[in-house]
Amino acid sequence: MLQITPWKVAQVVLMSRELDRAEGELRGFIDRLNEDEQASLVAVMWVGRESFAAEELGEAILTAKRDASVPTADYLLGSPHLSDHLENGMEELGMSLSDAEDDLIRRG
């Protein structure tokens, strides 16, 4: 089961699209997530890039926890197409980020 809210994933998606001006903010946001949230975020990205299938989410989360060898922010920011993979992963899991993204943009 996913241990991060769609709202938090949407935050990461929006900030990752603006890396040139939001990298420090994004790193701080990811660093403040707890271990379960960070592992879920990595797992969603893996599902989005088709390293794991949606039904393998639990295995992906366990793998993310077990294999973490660098800070999560470093790992995610080193991944090309991060925002696309997160959006695709959430869609594969049956969750849309569009409402959360729209809400964040309105607040911004």
Image (cartoon, helix red, strand yellow):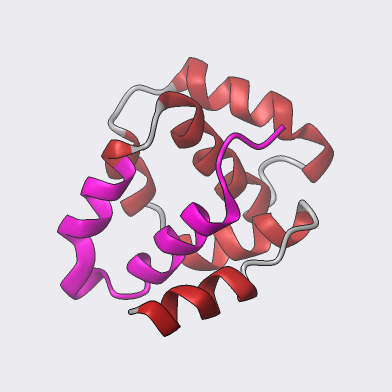
Q: Quadrant of the N terminus?
A: top right
Where residue 14 sits, quadrant-wise, is bottom left
Q: Nearer the viewer, residue 68 or 97?
A: 97
Q: Which residue lies furthest to the top in this view?
A: 66
Where residue 51 sits, quadrant-wise, is top right
Query: Where residue 102 sits: x, y (%)?
Result: 53, 80
Is 3 on the left or on the right of 75, as rendered?
right
Q: In which quarter of the image is the C terminus?
A: bottom left
Task: Tell me, yes or no, if residue 85 can be seen here.
Answer: yes
Q: Which of 106 and 41 is in front in this view?
A: 106
Q: Does the magenta stretch include residue 20?
A: yes
Query: Where residue 81 sits: x, y (%)?
Result: 46, 65
Q: Which residue is drawn at 67% across and 47% down?
A: 47
Dominant SS in magenta: helix
Task: Tell me, yes or no, if residue 78 can be seen here.
Answer: no
Query: Where residue 77 sits: x, y (%)?
Result: 32, 53
State the extent of the magenta-drawn residues as a range: 1-30
Q: Which residue lies furthest to the front in this view?
A: 107
Q: Which residue is drawn at 39% across and 29% down?
A: 34
Relative to 83, say whether 37 is above or below.
above
Q: Which residue lies furthest to the right in this view?
A: 55
Q: Residue at x 65, y 30 (%)?
A: 60
Relative to 105, say whether 61 is above or below.
above
Is 86 on the left or on the right of 15, as rendered?
right
Q: Which residue is drawn at 42% across and 62% down?
A: 11
Is 103 on the left or on the right of 48, as rendered?
left
Relative to 42, say whether 107 is above or below.
below
Query: Where residue 103 sits: x, y (%)?
Result: 51, 76
Q: Does the magenta stretch include residue 5?
A: yes
